[in-house]
Image (tube, helix red, strand yellow):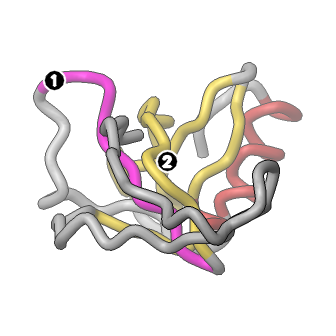
C-alpha cells in the first residue's frame, strides 16, 4: 500500500461537513498480477503455488508466501515475501483451492 500526504484548497462556497468522493491519479507502476483465485490462504497466510517437480503424471506444488498489494476485480497484484523467488517460475493460476484441499486432506503438496 502506498501512503502519501495530499494538500488541496477548498473554495469558500462549500458547506462545512460536505462529503467528497475523489479519484487521485498517482502515475503508473508495474505490478505482477495473477487471477485472484490463484492466491489462497493456507494456515492464515496468503500463498501462491509453485510447480516444484513432476514425476510421470504426478505434479508436486510448493506454497510460496506472498504479500498482497492490491486486489481489483478478478486480478490481484502481489510480491513475494521470501528472497530468491522470481516470476520466471511456473505458478498455478487456476485450481489453487483444489491443491490446498489436497494438502489439507493428504498432508502433502501434490
Q: Up-down: is 34 above or below 60?
A: below
- Residue situated in front as seen by the camera: 64 or 13: 13
Q: Position of residue 63 (x, y in %)?
A: 50, 36
Q: Secondary structure at mark 2?
A: strand
- Residue situated in front as seen by the camera: 68 or 83: 68
Magenta includes 57?
no
Q: Main secondary structure of the magenta part?
A: strand
Q: How many marks?
A: 2
Mark 2 surroundings: few (<14), some (14-19) or many (≥20) residues within 10 A:
many
C-alpha separation, residue under disc 1 versus residue under disc 2: 15 Å
90 vs 37, left or right, is: left
6 vs 71, left or right, is: left
Q: Position of residue 48 (x, y in %)?
A: 49, 47
Kindly identify which residue carries mark 2. 48
Please state the extent of the stretch shown in magenta in the rendering. Answer: 74-83
26 vs 73, left or right, is: left
Amino acid at each position: 500500500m502506498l501512503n502519501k500526504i495530499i494538500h488541496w484548497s477548498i473554495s469558500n462556497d462549500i458547506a462545512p461537513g460536505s462529503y467528497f468522493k475523489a479519484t487521485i491519479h498517482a502515475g503508473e507502476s508495474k505490478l505482477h498480477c495473477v487471477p485472484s483465485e490463484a492466491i489462497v490462504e493456507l494456515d492464515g497466510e496468503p500463498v501462491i503455488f509453485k510447480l516444484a517437480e513432476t514425476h510421470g503424471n504426478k505434479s508436486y506444488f510448493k506454497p510460496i508466501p506472498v504479500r498482497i498489494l492490491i486486489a481489483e476485480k478478478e486480478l490481484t497484484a502481489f510480491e513475494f515475501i521470501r528472497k530468491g523467488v522470481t516470476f520466471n517460475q511456473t505458478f498455478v493460476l487456476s485450481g489453487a483451492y483444489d491443491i490446498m484441499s489436497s494438502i489439507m486432506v493428504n498432508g502433502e503438496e501434490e
